[in-house]
Amino acid sequence: MRVLASVLRDYEDLGLEELELDDPGPGEVLVRILAAGVCHSDYHVVSGDLPLPTPMVLGHEGAGVVEAVGGGVSRVRPGDAVVLNWLPSCGHCRYCLDGRPELCRQPAVAAQHGTLPGGRTPFRRPSTGEPVYQFSLTGAFAERTVVPEAGVVPLPPGVPAHEAALLGCSVLTGTGAVWRTARVQPAESVAVLGTGGVGLNILQAARLVSAWPRIAVDANPRRLETAQGLGATHTVLAGQGGELDRILELTDGTGVDAAFEAIGRPETMALAFNATRPGGRAVLVGVAPPHVDLRVNAFAFPSQAKTLTGCWYGQSWPARDIPALARLHAAGVLTLESLASRRYRLDQLEEALQAMLKGTVTRALILPSG
Ligand code: APR
Ligand code: ZN
Ligand code: ZN
């Protein structure tokens, strides 16, 4: 079948192409993509900060409809509304059995190679037959894609695709960082460094568990305004110095119970650690390039008994947590509408990425088949 896709040909070189897409093989599913969020992780690949093979179809935060299933697929049927799960764990390795499916190696290895598990590449350039890779076992910036059965999560009825898409990355990641990794308790104080797509969900998750105060730190004043709408009780404009002092001032000089970094820079990661109170938790959610090291004061570790921890995909179980988040949305508890702020066609991906970088959108959405 022929499909239109936005293809990353080489770093910083994106273009619309017509590709050949295989039928779903055993254990695989063909999904028509209705909406796909533009996440900063996609940009990390465009810029080369996350080095991956090209040509590649990016896009990992998506929702759509199942159109066909391969042999042995039992959990979804054609016509089902689904959200993409970019970390389809194997279900039987040591990490999966430990309840930490986000650490499963099978999808991690496939993602490094831009393939499905086992090395299959369902996208091809029709003229040359050259394989086209897909980002993190998804490839949502295309009219259709083929993913493993575990790479789709059926949605309860009533969530439109342009809102559901966000559940697959930024909402799952942000809420999981607060509820699972940091286990924030009512009345605990939090600081969120970087209030983009992921950080805003960290803030709303902190609001939902009655954390207070909820301090938003961002270099972009527009993002801070949005943060106030989604749960920030205090805002700190970054980039002028004094961010740490301001956070300490707001927490009686001790620092916050839990600090979250959702930018992906070593300086702000160190700030998250420094802004955490003795005995508190600093959670790193942002993704830095693989060669980057982080410097924090060694003495503060034992003497202040702080926890510095990472959080990958919200430490979530997508098949359990995505429907739960959809129910919270249906109940009016979780906000999705104001997160998905502007829609673009498939051939406007570059424009959407620029809008994300400038911070003129909250979350840009690509509508590939509409
Ligand atoms: N200080 C403060 N804020 C900053 C700085 C800085 N030095 N640099 C960037 N920011 C802010 C931006 O203004 C923006 O609001 O960080 C935010 C990043 O938001 P997005 O671009 O929407 O990125 P998002 O998709 O939320 O991803 C954030 O999490 O999952 C990872 O790979 C992802 O590393 C990325 C991070
Ligand atoms: Zn993402
Ligand atoms: Zn596993």
Image: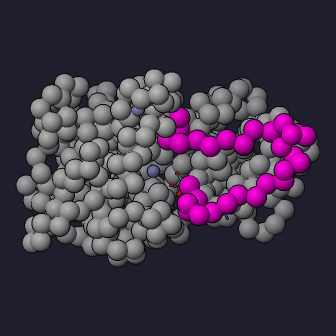
Which of 117/3 is in front? 117
Write down which quadrant ligand 3 falls in: top left
Percent across and percent down for residue 260 are 67, 46
In the rendered image, residue 288 lying in the magenta stretch gets the answer: yes
Percent across and percent down for residue 342 are 40, 58
Residue 334 in view, yes or no: no
The residue sitting at 19% across, 39% down in the picture is 29
User: Toward which corner of the image does residue 30 lie, by quadrant?
Assistant: top left
Percent across and percent down for residue 320 are 41, 25
User: Toward which corner of the image does residue 156 lie, by quadrant?
Assistant: top left
Q: Is residue 270 left or right of residue 3?
A: right
Q: Is residue 330 left or right of residue 81?
A: right
The residue sitting at 42% across, 46% down in the picture is 108
Q: Quadrant of the C terminus?
A: bottom left
Percent across and percent down for residue 39 are 45, 56
The residue sitting at 76% across, 31% down in the picture is 188
> Range of the magenta residues?
287-315
Tell me: residue 66, above or below residue 229: above
The colour scheme used to paint the residues is one colour
Residue 151 in view, yes or no: yes
Circle count: 0
The residue sitting at 7% across, 55% down in the picture is 1
Q: Is residue 299 left or right of residue 121?
A: right
Which of 283/322 is in front? 283
User: Toward which corner of the image does residue 341 lie, by quadrant?
Assistant: bottom left
In the rendered image, residue 129 lying in the magenta stretch gets the answer: no
